[in-house]
Amino acid sequence: MRTQRLKIHGQHFGAVVCDGRQNDKGGTLVLLHGFTGSAAGWGELLTAFSTSGLRVIALDMLGHGLSDAPKEVERYSMEHCQADIIAVLQELGVSPGTAILLGYSMGGRIALYCAFSDFFRALVLESASAGLATAEEREQRQRSDAALAERIERIGIEAFVAYWEQIPLFASQKNLPAERRASLHAQRLNNRPQGLANSLRGIGTGVQPALHERLSELDLPVLLITGALDPKFYTIARLMAQRLPQAQLHIVAGTGHTVHLEQPGTFVQLVQDFCTTVL
């Protein structure tokens, strides 16, 4: 396992690469983290995935982890994300049609958009969405994200993380072992206020393109994973599964928004089984 920083389109991107033992099919699993996350936040899951023979690449989105945090909000846009991710993967030697893209929450929204590029072989979405369907919903979310971005810049990273960890979406994370909660807390603190704020402004749910009407066009295998304690997102996943031509849905009992942290063994098995079927 190695950590790299690559300069792509004028910005530096952090990546954790785990080559593992390569399988005959040469598949690559690419992981995109959620808001306040990082490539390093996947922790032991990177090794677990690589033992199945996959090459594993976890990326830091702009404003997170080891990636740059530019001042220009438009640099964080979904269109830039897609171009950056594909360019990073090509720099790392990934060929079109060989990579499975996995995204969690914010990373899931990015992954879904990137899947329309035809670069990827299959898609895994954990606690993700296709955006907000109506202009009214998007405008309301833009306002709330803008207010939250200003709050991050005003109060700083430590106070923001303390607030963020108490929101209802992450209530089930209180059941995690103490050492895992401490590791997650430390990882969240390793971000910068400007990066998180501009990520919200540039790629928040309110500003991303709504993809609901395009789901039927995405004719590639998709695995949807959500937690049974996260009713908002398992409802979203069920609706997405109805529109996607090749979707399978797993709702994991006893877990909330962050299935890969709360039930890592189950999560790894679901993803490995899916990868085996599509490679």
Image: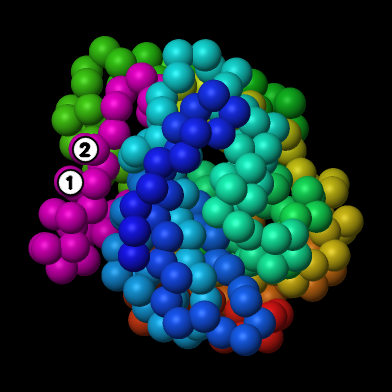
Crowding at mark 2 (Cα within 10 Å: few <14, some 14-19, many 20+): some
- Kind of element beneath mark 2: helix
**In this picture, is 155 found above or below 263?**
above
Query: 158 or 242, which is in the foreground?
Result: 158
- Residue of label 2: 189
Which numbered disc covers residue 218?
A: none
Quarter of the figure with the N terminus:
bottom left
Q: Which residues are magenta?
A: 170-197
- Amino acid type assigned to the residue bearing label 1 in the image: Ala
Q: Is residue 1 left or right of residue 29?
A: left
User: At x 42% / y 76%, what residue is drawn?
Assistant: 20
**In this picture, is 139 found above or below 174?**
above
Alpha-carbon span between mark 2 and mark 1: 5 Å
Q: Residue 206: x percent and y percent? A: 61, 29
Q: Is residue 265 left or right of residue 83?
A: left
- Label 2 with label 1: CB-CB less than 8 Å: yes
- Amino acid type assigned to the residue bearing label 2 in the image: Leu
- Kind of element beneath mark 1: helix
Q: Residue 246: x percent and y percent? A: 79, 72
- Residue of label 1: 186
Q: Residue 121: x percent and y percent? A: 73, 67
Question: Quarter-wise, where is residue 95 in the image?
Answer: bottom right
